[in-house]
Image: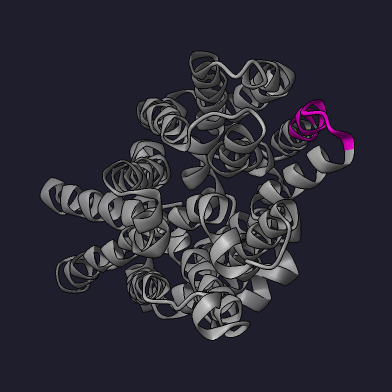
Amino acid sequence: MVSVAPEKKTLRRLMAAGLAGSSIEWYDFFIYATAAALVFPKLFFPEATPIVGLLLSFSTFWAGFIARPIGGLVFGHVGDKFGRKPALVICLALMAAATFLIGLLPTSSSIGVGAPILLVLLRFLQGIAVGGQWGGVVLLLTESAQDNRRGFAGTFGQAGVPIGVFLGNVAFILATTTLSKEAFADWGWRVPFLASALLFPVVLFIQLKVEDSPVFRELKENRTPAAQAPLKEALRTHRKPILLGAGLMFASNAIFYVSIAGVLSYATTTLGLSRESVLIVSLLSSVVSIPVILWAGHASDRMGRRPLIIAGAIGLVLWAFPYFLLVDTGSLVLLFVAATVGGIASSLVYGPIAAYLGELFEPHVRYSGASLAYQLASILVSGGTPFIMTALLGATGSSMSVSAFLCLMGLATLFSALKLPETHRAS
């Protein structure tokens, strides 16, 4: 990956815009997980039993992940052919609009079966948006940085994930603690979704103040016939890095979605903990992940991408069973320890991923290839994890079955990292 170093001021502006846009975009995507665990079963599936209602609610959550590879396909093609920036701007605007509309959505008590149908549709649009935006933001960052700073630059897109979780939890904690249960169920849950309107000024700033990456500008000037169909070429010639790149994400995605959605439901319904306390635990563990992601990306510029990812994968394999042994105690302190240690191991994987996935692909198919790898993991693991966790708990009655699932995902990430080459010194 060859990059042309921009002025420091320009790069700082880009990093700030990337962090802000990514954080709000992921906030929009993740508040749905919280609402799916806390309020959507009763509001959109009132006739179902509690366990069935929760499964149905998490299935709508999964719809966003089914849509993410579609977003990766569509906007990967747009980003490789027309530019990283226009693809990103469209995706951010689409996410803001879909999330805002969820906040205005009538429930089943008002329009019957139309309510869950519209909920799934808007969640699907959220998935398309986030499926396309990841490639845009991380490629703008990594392709605009110097070669020895790509790992660190990419973390300003990656850190948007824990920041988004933090902001989402703050929004729901404020809503649940300042409102009665009746007011929260009636209208209070809508406020975090309506707050997504804050993404529109970020979209405007990126459109007006941020240039496309130097790599894409050079690519555009030297466009070759083979690059006219970047998506087709990525699928034809880069299947191995796409599949193994997806495998890199399995462990990190699995433990992340267990922590922010599955455990939220499990701890409040099975263990009897208050939702505010569990949200605070999730919030605090997310704060710890932010500096670890930044450090891991920075360290990967010196040590290489693979050593960090391999260390994180081994950590997640070893932590899979202690994780739920601690959660099952019902202690908030031990729940925090479980989530935080898991989050640190996950961050060692997640921090270098932005630069690593980009470096695995040539510039003219980079947006398509990296997006496909990242979003393929979402449909295979991420969106289904809360559903799988709920189903495993219902079938076995033991959280150890979920630990076995997390262990398996860690082994998949370790295998993928061992099969892929090191890239951080490539130019």
User: In this view, which residue lies farthest toward the right?
Assistant: 396
Q: Which of the 4 image quadrants contains residue 315?
A: top right
* Residue 109 in sight from this viewpoint: yes
User: In this view, which residue lies farthest toward the left?
Assistant: 9
Q: Is residue 38 magenta?
A: no
Classify 354 as above or below 122: above
Which portion, as a residue range, is magenta? 396-407
Classify 414 as above or below 386: above
Q: Nearer the viewer, residue 284 or 425?
A: 284
Residue depicted at x 57% and y 44%: 261
Point out residue 130 in the picture as x, y percentages from the top left corner: 48, 64
Q: Nearer the viewer, residue 240 or 175?
A: 175
Point out residue 153 in the picture as x, y percentages from the top left corner: 33, 42
Q: Nearer the viewer, residue 345 or 77?
A: 345
Point out residue 56 in the picture as x, y percentages from the top left corner: 69, 62
Point out residue 318 in the picture as x, y percentages from the top left corner: 71, 17
Q: Which of the 4 image quadrants contains residue 169?
A: top left
Relative side of 179 to 397, left or right: left
* Prevailing secondary structure class for the magenta stretch in the rendered image: helix
Q: Nearer the viewer, residue 128 or 279?
A: 279
Relative side of 147 to 67, left or right: left
Q: Which of the 4 image quadrants contains residue 389?
A: top right
Classify 274 as above or below 9: above
Residue depicted at x 41% and y 44%: 165
